[in-house]
Amino acid sequence: MADILSQDEVDLLLNAVSEGELEVGEQEQKALEEPHLMTYDFRRPERVSKEQLKGLQSLFEAFARELSIAFPPFLRTVVRVDLVSIDQLTYDEFILSVARPTCLSVINMAPLEGNAVLELSPAMVFPIVDRVLGGSGVSLSEPRELTEIENRIVMRIVMMILDSWRRSWEQLIEFRQSVVTQESDPLIVQIVAGSEMVVLVGYEVHLGEQSGAMNMCIPLMVLNPILDQISQQAHYTRKMSAATAAHMREVITRTNLRAEVPVEVILGTAELPLDEIAQLQVGDIVQLDSSPDEPIRITVGGIQRFRAQPGRRGEQSAVQLSSVVRN
């Protein structure tokens, strides 16, 4: 059994070191003189690693792209969604930072256990409501609570957001999300204890000339079951081998080559007054603005790509390509 030093022996050794009678290595002496200290806040433990944060950033950027595609046809205007930040903080800090009134939707994260919060700021909500109701997308000078009709419109928008969320994460998990409730006061929305850590994802949504904020608050306890998968997915994306990249490029090329696009042969065009169009009868002749000697236009997907000469092949009408149009 190893000998155990008494307190008197420990004091003698320390005195010998301080008086220079006992040699101490340079590194050990430096460690004694300058201990290495780190600041740690027990109220805000960092539980998501850098690898996992990079994976989350990739997924939430994909979600922003999906939303930028889904919104414009519905709102009939240009919409751009930008990922601004991904932060870790306590749930209390998130709730206290939310202005009132606002639009909060509690989202059930099935098949994961627990709920998340989706916040749409008034600067985002009211221009959308105005566009849906036929306006130009004007924001209100003073935020207010939503009416029943406006709540129904916002519910439609939230469902579109969840659809985009599902599509952007489908390679990782098949979400079956649903809206639990909608509130305007953040202080009555309590999905976890105030000290629980959450991931707060901030977006800026540009709707025409207006812009507003959208925030997604997801408790870490909800994401914990898939954090390792998120980390592995991010690692795989960055470390894709040359052979895998070439295979993916080949698959994408084959898929694109099988895509069907409309090809239209335009013999010519004509402009007629609306009253003449209303009086057209079967057998009437409409004179086109093209000449028989001029090549006709061929469009692919609505864009002119070729010039050609009309003719016949057997019993069918046909065209013979004469040149390629370089755009």
Image (cartoon, rainbow, N blue to C red):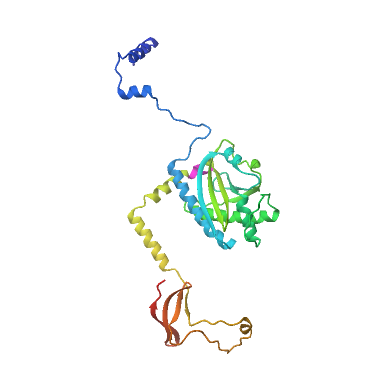
Residue found at x 55% / y 58%: 79
- Residue 122 locus on image (x, y percent): 63, 50
- Residue 73 locus on image (x, y percent): 56, 63
Asked if residue 165 shows in the view, the reply is: yes
Query: Foreground: 125 or 152?
Result: 125
Q: Quadrant of the N terminus?
A: top left
Question: Is 42 colored magenta in this rendering?
Answer: no
Position of residue 246 in the picture relative to residue 222 (left or right): left
Residue at the right extreme of this rendering: 148
Q: Is residue 209 above or below residue 10?
A: below
Residue found at x 42% / y 79%: 307
- Residue 108 locus on image (x, y percent): 59, 48
Query: Foreground: 67 or 313?
Result: 67
Magenta span of residues: 222-226
Displayed quadrant of residue 94: top right
Residue found at x 55% / y 55%: 206
Question: Is 224 colored magenta in this rendering?
Answer: yes
Displayed quadrant of residue 36: top left
Position of residue 252 in the picture relative to residue 133 (left or right): left
Asked if residue 109 shows in the view, the reply is: no
Q: Main secondary structure of the magenta part?
A: helix
Q: How many marks?
A: 0
Q: Is residue 182 above or below residue 305?
A: above
- Residue 154 locus on image (x, y percent): 63, 54
Q: Quadrant of the C terminus?
A: bottom left
Query: Foreground: 162 or 69?
Result: 69
